[in-house]
Image (spheres, helix red, strand yellow):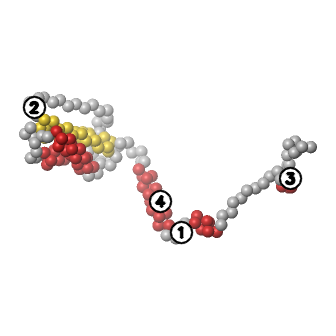
Amino acid sequence: MSEENAPVPTDLDDALENGGLFFVTQILPVEAEDDLRPAAGDVDTDIEDEARVEQEEDLSTYQLEPTVTVKPGNIKSLAERALAEYFRDREYSATEMRDAVLQISSDIREEVRNLLLDRYRIVCQVTVGENCDQDVAMAFLCLWKHEFDHYAVATYNGTDFFATALVFVVYKQ
């Protein structure tokens, strides 16, 4: 008989004698096993890791309503104060205002974030334009829940320019 047509051994002893089965095991040296064991100093990191995992588990609470109430009047006063502080003794310059808008919007966002509005997304849009005896109309359209999501509009009128800050506070479920 040829080896290709040899019967498949059914007994483990027959298989071992005929070379039909073989086992592969990997034995690690003692040094490698020691590297896999946590060291005594790693116990603190394990505790920190467990605390971090518990904090991450707290994030997904499936909370459908906010725990704090947003007061748009407070946000409006923060934005008006930020606009007044920055633009108090300034004149309009297109290049200077471009950088100012970025700085002011980030400052307003940080101040609103300091109100500790957990689970709220804060969007701030600042617009600065030159007064040229023209009318300006600004509009925004949003889809949101009126019970939880809010906005505030703050304006500042300088001698030759105007500034408007829109702050949207949207609840993240």
Q: Quadrant of residue 121?
A: top left
In the image, residue 163 sits, relative to residue 53, either above or below, namely above
Q: Residue furthest right?
A: 1
Q: How far apart are marks 3 and 1 (CA)?
A: 46 Å
The residue wearing badge 3 is: 18
The residue wearing badge 4 is: 50
Q: Which residue is drawn at 9% across and 40% down?
A: 158
Q: Distance between the residues labelled 4 and 1?
A: 17 Å
The residue wearing badge 1 is: 39
Q: Is mark 1 on a helix, strand or loop?
A: loop
Q: What element carries label 2?
A: loop
Q: In which quarter of the image is the C terminus?
A: top left
Q: Position of residue 55 (x, y in %)?
A: 42, 55
- Specify which label sits upstream in the sequence, 4 or 1: 1
Q: How crowded is mark 1: few (under 14 residues within 10 Å), some or many (20 or more)?
A: few
- Specify which label sits upstream in the sequence, 1 or 2: 1
The residue wearing badge 2 is: 132
Q: Residue furthest left?
A: 159
Picture mark count:
4
